[in-house]
Image (spheres, rainbow, N blue to C red):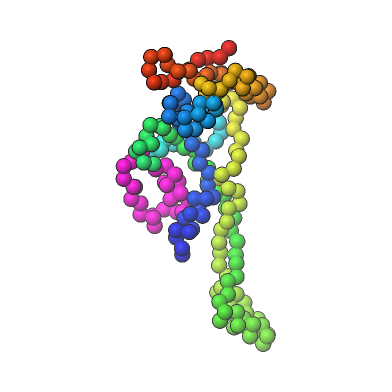
Amino acid sequence: MDFHRYYRDAMDSHGVLSLSENCNNLLMWAHYGSEHKGLCLGFDWAETGLPPAKQVNYNSMYRLVDIWAYTEDELAEIACFQKSIEWAYEREWRSFSTATYESYSQLELTQEAREELERAEAQGEEWLARDIKRKHTFRYRRPKEFGHRAIPFEKKSLKEVIFGARMTEAERGKHVAYITALGYAPTFYQVVRHPQRYALKLRKLN
């Protein structure tokens, strides 16, 4: 088995949603908030109906894992919850969405087996043809539904919407109108610069 290819394929089949404990971190807004022009969604995660969120483990060394003690799906999940300690300021949590699979069979003949099968069929030796096919038929699995997909969440779980410090009033108004028209009822905030230090604080909007 080409383990590395198989492991990579398992990773590609799942989905990860990245979250943070902190809604007013300067670096987070700069890196992920469209340079303070974007927005941040705040959830009560227990009410979302989505897969549970777990804390990311930050380490200075790679985690050593006995790969034969885990399934490829378990290894994918382990890998998704490890990051360098340099990213610890993100205080990240992740929701890991697994794929569902279906099994299928595939006949894979070598050149020698193909010639043997052709001879058996030509001579009417059905029992031999069936035996050749049985020996060279392999079972595989493929994703039936990928983990990386859009999954609806419970509307009541969206508790806050926080706008970036550089988002204009007109843009904020458009977002508020759109979000409320969809049936969500969060509290709206905007992050503003702290007057004395390099920090952000929340200002509730009317």
Residue 109 visible? The answer is: yes
In this rendered view, identify the residue nearer to me: 168 or 180. Answer: 168
Quarter residue 41 falls in: top right
Q: Exactly how many numbered labels are in the figure?
A: 0
Residue 177 place in picture, x, y as percent: 66, 21
Q: Residue furthest bottom?
A: 123
In this view, 151 is above or below 45: below
Q: Residue furthest top?
A: 206
Residue 58 place in picture, x, y as percent: 36, 39
Quarter of the image where the C terminus is located: top right
In this view, 10 is above or below 1: above
In this rendered view, identify the residue nearer to me: 45 or 84. Answer: 84
Point out the stretch of residues depicted in magenta.
Answer: 58-82
Residue 19 falls within the magenta-colored stretch: no
Residue 55 place in picture, x, y as percent: 41, 35
* Horizontal side, residue 197 vs residue 50: left or right: left
- Residue pictured at 55% horizontal, 67% vertical: 138
Residue 183 visible? The answer is: no
Residue 191 place in picture, x, y as percent: 49, 20
In this rendered view, identify the residue nearer to me: 154 or 175. Answer: 175
* Horizontal side, residue 107 vs residue 71: left or right: right
Quarter residue 111 falls in: bottom right
* Horizontal side, residue 147 vs residue 82: left or right: right
- Residue pictured at 44% horizontal, 58% vertical: 4
- Residue pictured at 58% horizontal, 53% vertical: 143
In this view, 63 is above or below 39: below
- Residue pictured at 55% horizontal, 74% vertical: 135
